[in-house]
Image (cartoon, grey):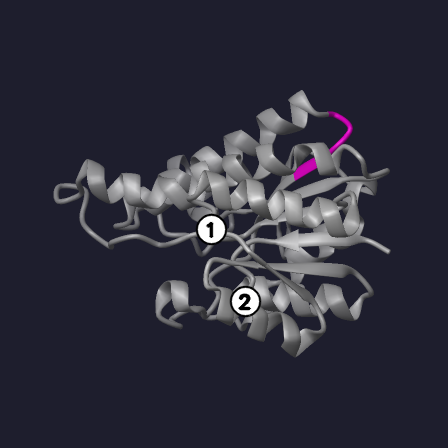
């Protein structure tokens, strides 16, 4: 049975991914920084909850030990936890605004990945799925006319956009450093979740499709790629 951990899984895309993977037979760990919400979400779908605040070193290490004691390994890690940060024009953004977004979106993904690497390396076909965004695509931002995309050329959320661009590079570098683990980034698209005040044009069921697909493929699929629901997304 495939063992999967999803960060930020008590709601939105994380919860829908957890629900679908649990239906598919995965042993799913619902990572959440709020223990009560995490337990409630896990109980609703027959999963396991684990306290996991991606911004806290000790909490992440404790979560890794918790999974190690109960499962001994990890087959799939989904780095889903993240924040949108303040929507401000470029002239008004501050270093503090950007730091507040990078802390969970980028540094959190590094922190969790590093902590769970030993468990992933015990799997026969491990995979890491980093939930990114088309807003982090340098190719689309630089030359939108060459790409069929609904992603805006400029979006007033520099912390979010740049954190996802950095997450994309992180994905590629991890894929090169660990050829035995499938590292991929995914763009769920503009999905109606708490992250955007439910303004997205897709449902969570639609947005989660690409996350679920890569998680289901596991280590048997591609690595070092950026996928959306319609196929490859340009870096």
Q: Position of residue 76 (x, y in %)?
A: 72, 47
Tell me if I can see residue 137 in this picture: no
Above or below 70: residue 144: above
Q: Residue furthest top?
A: 177
Q: Nearer the viewer, residue 95 or 115?
A: 115
Query: Please, what secondary structure does the residue beneath circle 1 have?
Result: loop
Instruction: Give the magenta range.
Output: 179-183
Judge left or right: residue 91 versus residue 128.
Answer: left
Q: Position of residue 6 (x, y in %)?
A: 61, 55
Residue found at x 39% / y 63%: 195
Q: Position of residue 144 (x, y in %)?
A: 42, 43
Query: Please, what secondary structure does the residue beneath circle 2 have?
Result: helix
* Numbered badge on residue 8: none
Residue found at x 59% / y 48%: 63
Judge left or right: residue 187 versus residue 217.
Answer: left
* Numbered badge on residue 53: 1
Residue found at x 51% / y 50%: 148
Q: Main secondary structure of the magenta part?
A: loop
Which residue corresponds to mark 2? 38
Q: Residue furthest left?
A: 92
Dot 1, how many residues are within 10 Å of its Cα: few (below 14), some (14-19), or many (20+)? many
**Picture quarter containing residue 113?**
top right
Dot 2, how many residues are within 10 Å of its Cα: few (below 14), some (14-19), or many (20+)? many
């Amino acid at each position: 049975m495939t063992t999967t951990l999803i960060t930020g899984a008590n709601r939105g895309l994380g919860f829908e991914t957890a629900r679908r993977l649990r239906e598919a037979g995965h042993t799913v760990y619902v990572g959440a920084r709020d223990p009560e919400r995490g337990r409630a979400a896990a109980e609703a779908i027959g999963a396991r909850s684990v306290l996991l605040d991606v911004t806290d070193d000790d909490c992440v290490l404790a979560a890794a030990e918790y999974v190690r004691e109960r499962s001994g390994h990890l087959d799939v890690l989904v780095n889903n936890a993240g924040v949108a940060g303040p929507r401000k024009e470029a002239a008004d953004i501050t270093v503090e605004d950007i730091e507040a977004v990078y802390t969970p979106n980028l540094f959190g993904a590094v922190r969790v990945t590093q902590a769970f690497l030993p468990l992933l390396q015990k799997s026969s076909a491990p995979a890491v799925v980093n939930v990114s965004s088309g807003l982090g695509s340098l190719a689309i931002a630089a030359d939108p006319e060459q790409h069929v995309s609904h992603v805006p050329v400029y979006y007033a959320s520099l912390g979010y956009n740049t954190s996802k661009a950095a997450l994309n590079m992180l994905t590629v570098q991890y894929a090169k450093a660990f050829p035995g683990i499938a590292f991929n980034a995914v763009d769920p698209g503009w999905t109606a979740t708490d992250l955007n005040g439910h303004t997205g044009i897709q449902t969570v069921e639609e947005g989660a499709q690409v996350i679920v697909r890569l998680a289901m493929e596991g280590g048997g699929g591609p690595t070092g790629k950026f996928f959306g629901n319609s196929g490859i997304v340009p870096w």
